[in-house]
Amino acid sequence: MRKVGSRIAITLTLVAMTWTVSSQQVKRSSGSDAPRIQHAAPADATTLATRQRFLEMFARAYFPGRTGQLLIVPREGDFITRPDVAYMHGSPWTYDVAIPLMFVGPAVRTGMYSTPAVQQDVAPTLAAALGVQMPPTTTGRVLPVLRTGLARPRVVMLLVLDGMRRDYFDRYAASMPTLTALRQRSAWFNQAQVNFLPTNTAVGHSTLSTGTDPRVHGITGVNVYERTQRRRHDFFAGGTPQDLMVLTLADVWQLATAGRAIILAQGSIDRAATPLAGHGACQLNGAPVVLASYDQETGNWTTNPNCFRLPAYLKDRNAKTLWPASGEWMGHEIDSTAAVRYSALFPAFEADAMAAMMEREPLGDKVPDLILMNYKGADFVGHKYGPDSDEMRVTLGEMDRQLKRMLSALEAKVGNDYLLAVTADHGMPPEPSSPDRRHLAPSIVDLLHEKFDPDAKQLITSFEPENGQIFVDEDRLSSLGLTLRDLAHFLESQPFLFAVFTNEDVCRAANALQPATPTPRHSKYK
């Protein structure tokens, strides 16, 4: 512990040195005529502590070869996005990290839990309910919500409400009677939050499904820049699970039951659906579990047949049946298989597929079964219209109605003998206080190029705002006589950025984190 404490102290000192510096300027080594970079003003102790916390959040997601060269945090109330996305999550501020977490069912000790809880705790807790243990790669813990001495539930279900801020449960309670009733008879964690960066769909679902930090499972964003191939690599594209470096709850349970358990995974985007399903048949001794993933180009449910299976009764369902003849919803054009997702019409399509699987698959036999669902309406609508919109209120109400229908289908098969976990992968920022607090990632790339590489504009290779990471061509950086620290100092001088770390900063912080320890075996729940 003393060694770990000293490492953290060293890291904090390094952060302070990065931020709290004298007013002297830094020269580029390429000559006296090079641009001079002014350091940021000294920070107070509270700011330094907050920076350290954010650095450690990035450190929990540091993975060699996958983490970008610059890792950025916008100021609270500012956010960085793309021209086609009105609202963008990914930050460490409360609106992006405060998530709901509840467990419901006869096996649950109900009540309000004020103890801290994180996404890494979900898979170990559900595994304990099934009577198995997650692998030693797990960094989460079994939450104290399970009653002792009860039989295993016939079905364990994980419902991930994509983009669902925790405060929606209070603000929109009247529109969500089903979720409100579940909360009232649940084990509810009022301090649950995401403890890593970035806060986005791919990283969140991978963490929920594996019970471990991103620094272990390897999913560090929705994509990375592949330096050797000079191209972007999208995680889970086409339902390929190979980028996920550890076993998931679905993997563990199908191996523990020798493929006898029914495992259903569904999601409305590959990077949510695939990590929930795990590796399927694309692992040693694996079986092709069910994976239904929405294809926005065709409007059909699809899967990767090399690893998973798609039930025949889902193959002919198409989202083109959702929109009315006018092609509008609440005054918005939604007459395409991509656009219809950004409406309250889409949750019915998601629920239809899940209810069909619940009704037609042999759930609830001698072996407990596992259902994992990404329910994405709040995320789609939040990205386009924001958390405070009428569109969000209407969408949450429709999601709630469709959830009631899905639970009715499940209860028709197994009664109340199931365990339901409800949580989210991330939140969503509110409407900014002024238009100039919404910043576009391409403009930030242009800003860096204009400052450091105005002729070739080759220094920055990729910047996806939801990842909070800028990928830099380090060969080009060196040829310009620059360091990553130069770029970080320049970015931190921008009024809309709270902190900018280099991957060297994050690597040191990751080395200072306590190593992952195996989750204790939960032996009393039989």
Image (spheres, rainbow, N blue to C red):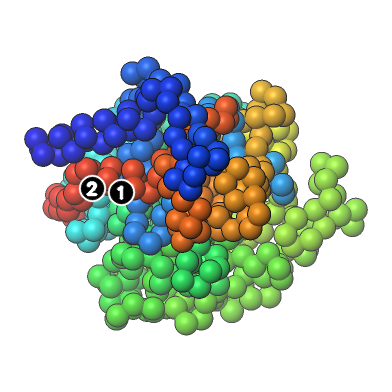
Residue at the left extreme of this rendering: 2
- Residue 276 in percent (x, y) is at 43, 61
Task: Note whether residue 319 is visible.
Answer: yes
Could you say whether the residue bearing mark 1 is in a helix, strand or loop?
helix
Distance from Cα at disc 2 to Cα at disc 1: 6 Å
- The image quadrant that residue 14 belongs to is top left
Which corner quadrant holds the C terminus? bottom left
Whether residue 415 is situated above or below residue 401 in the rendered picture? below
Crowd band around label 2 with a 10 angstrom C-alpha radius: few (<14), some (14–19), many (20+): some
Q: Is residue 132 left or right of residue 332?
A: left
Q: Residue extending furthest front? A: 32
Residue 511: give its label. Answer: 2
User: Can you identify the residue that label 1 sits on?
Assistant: 507
Residue 149 in the figure: left or right of residue 198: left
Classify residue 133 by image quadrant: bottom left
Residue 319, label in figure: none
Residue at figure coordinates x 62%, y 70% from the top left: 301
Observer-nearest of 426 and 29: 29
Instruction: Say if mark 2 contacts mark 1, CB within 8 Å.
Output: yes
Is 476 left, or right, of 216 in this rendering?
right
Residue type at mark 2: give it: Asn
Do we see residue 180 in this rendering? no
The disc labelled 1 sits on which kind of residue? Cys
* x and y percentages locating residue 408 in the rendered image: 53, 52
Percent from the top left, x then y, of residue 284?
29, 80
Q: Secondary structure at mark 2?
A: helix
* Residue ID at (57%, 46%): 452
Q: Which image quarter holds the N terminus?
A: top left
